[in-house]
């Protein structure tokens, strides 16, 4: 049986997490149209009769403007070491930009096979796609150039057999049915963060952390208490909204997804808390088993 680790790398917003979810046929990583959605390394295991593949979704690599940016980039690079294959995802509508060249230069150092994924083919015409493929063939000796639409699941059926060719012939990595590295509480907190990202404007999302403080699972229901932590009163105001309407809508959307995940009725109590001091925030998160990203 073939098995191995495959990292999914690229600029923010190109569709890496959408691809991970499509390959695993489940919603594991959150998705939004804001750059910088993924902040943690998310692993998901794909398995069929012929192979077992651990896919590693990573934060988008970008020109860092602060400490957090540096940390996210570092996480993505580290996840591309010691894997068997790199899926380098680009947004084919935007083309191969400066940011992509920067990432490619760094990836080359790993001396691993790089499979170039051209995502979002639904946004361009076929002749344009063929031109781009010819152009990218000259850039680097990619082991394959593979056009897809992750959100429309186009051309995905051939991707697993293609990836399989580059994996070593070894036994299973996990024998115990492991599916992911993320915990249930982390997943719940991410679903809430996704709704915040999807419902607010650019300036809000990056100042937001979500934490699950209590989760009680009963036979027919799950009771969850969670807090959205922000670093400024002004952001809290936006998230709560007029007459708490925004918070209510975030809760409704999150609950819908969580009910699907748990396959049970979900009672979700959502709070918003301002913590300006990062040390204080760190202590608060730790109390509930969460860690601050910047550490
Ligand atoms: N039209 C189109 N949109 C897509 C496709 N794949 C992803 N998207 C959209 O692109 C946006 C970004 O998707 P994500 O999967 O969150 O991107 P990401 O690369 O994980 O982003 P970061 O986590 O910020 O690095 C979302 O709005 C997706 O719905 C696609 O094949 N076609
Ligand atoms: Mg992502």
Image (spheres, grey):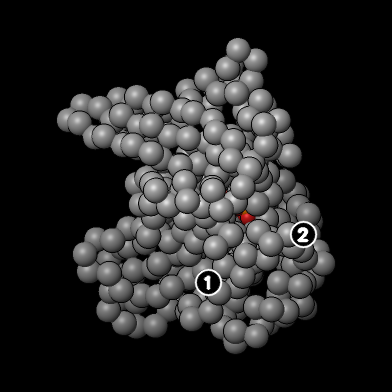
Q: Which mark is residue 79?
A: 1
Quadrant where the image shows the N terminus = bottom left
* Closer mark to the observer between disc 2 and disc 1: 2
Tell which circle, 2 or 1, labels the residue nearer the N-terminal end: 2
Question: Which is more toward the observer, 122 or 259?
Answer: 259
Question: Which is more toward the observer, 60 or 5?
Answer: 60
Q: Which mark is residue 91?
A: none
Picture layout, residue 80 above or below residue 228:
below
Q: Are the residues tagged 2 and 1 within 8 Å (C-beta)?
A: no
Q: Quadrant of residue 155?
A: bottom right
Q: Looking at the image, which residue is at 50% across and 41% down?
A: 210
Dot 2 crowding, Cα within 10 Å, few <14, some 14–19, many 20+: few
Give the residue furthest to the left: 219
Q: Give the image location of residue 62, x and y in percent.
A: 72, 62
The answer as to whether callout 2 falls within 8 Å of ligand 1 is no
- Horizontal side of residue 185 vs 291, given as left or right: left
Dot 1 crowding, Cα within 10 Å, few <14, some 14–19, many 20+: many
Give the residue furthest to the right: 98
Residue 161 in sight in this render: yes
Is label 1 in a helix, a strand or a loop? loop
Query: What whole-number distance in Å separates the C-alpha atoms at marks 2 and 1?
Result: 21 Å
Q: Give the image location of residue 273, x and y in percent.
A: 55, 33
Q: Looking at the image, which residue is at 43% across and 78% down?
A: 167
Q: Quadrant of residue 101?
A: bottom right
Question: Which is more toward the observer, 285 or 115?
Answer: 285
The residue tagged 2 is: 65
């Amino acid at each position: 049986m073939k098995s191995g680790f495959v990292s999914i790398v690229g600029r923010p917003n190109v569709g890496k997490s959408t691809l991970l979810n499509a390959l695993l046929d489940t919603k594991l990583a959150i998705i939004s149209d804001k750059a910088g959605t993924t902040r943690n390394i998310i692993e998901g295991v794909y398995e069929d009769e012929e192979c077992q593949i651990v896919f590693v979704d990573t934060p988008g690599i970008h020109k860092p403007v602060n400490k957090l940016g540096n940390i996210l980039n570092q996480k993505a690079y580290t996840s591309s070491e010691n894997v068997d294959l790199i899926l380098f995802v680009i947004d084919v509508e935007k083309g191969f930009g400066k940011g992509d060249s920067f990432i490619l230069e760094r990836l080359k150092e790993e001396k691993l096979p790089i499979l170039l994924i051209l995502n979002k083919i639904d946004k361009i015409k076929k002749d344009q796609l063929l031109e781009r493929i010819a152009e990218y063939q000259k850039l680097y000796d990619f082991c394959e150039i593979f056009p897809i639409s992750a959100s429309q699941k186009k051309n995905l059926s051939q991707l697993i057999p293609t990836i399989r060719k580059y994996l070593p012939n070894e036994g299973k990595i996990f024998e115990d049915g492991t599916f992911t590295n993320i915990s249930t509480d982390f997943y719940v907190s991410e679903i809430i963060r996704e709704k915040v990202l999807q419902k607010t404007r650019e300036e809000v999302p990056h100042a937001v952390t979500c934490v699950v403080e209590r989760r009680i699972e009963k036979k027919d229901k799950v009771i969850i208490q969670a807090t959205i932590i922000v670093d400024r009163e002004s952001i809290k105001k936006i998230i709560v909204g007029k007459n708490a309407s925004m918070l209510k809508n975030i809760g409704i959307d999150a609950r819908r997804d969580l009910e699907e995940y748990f396959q049970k009725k979900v009672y979700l109590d959502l709070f918003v808390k301002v913590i300006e001091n990062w040390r204080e925030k760190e202590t608060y998160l730790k109390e509930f088993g969460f860690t601050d990203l910047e550490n």
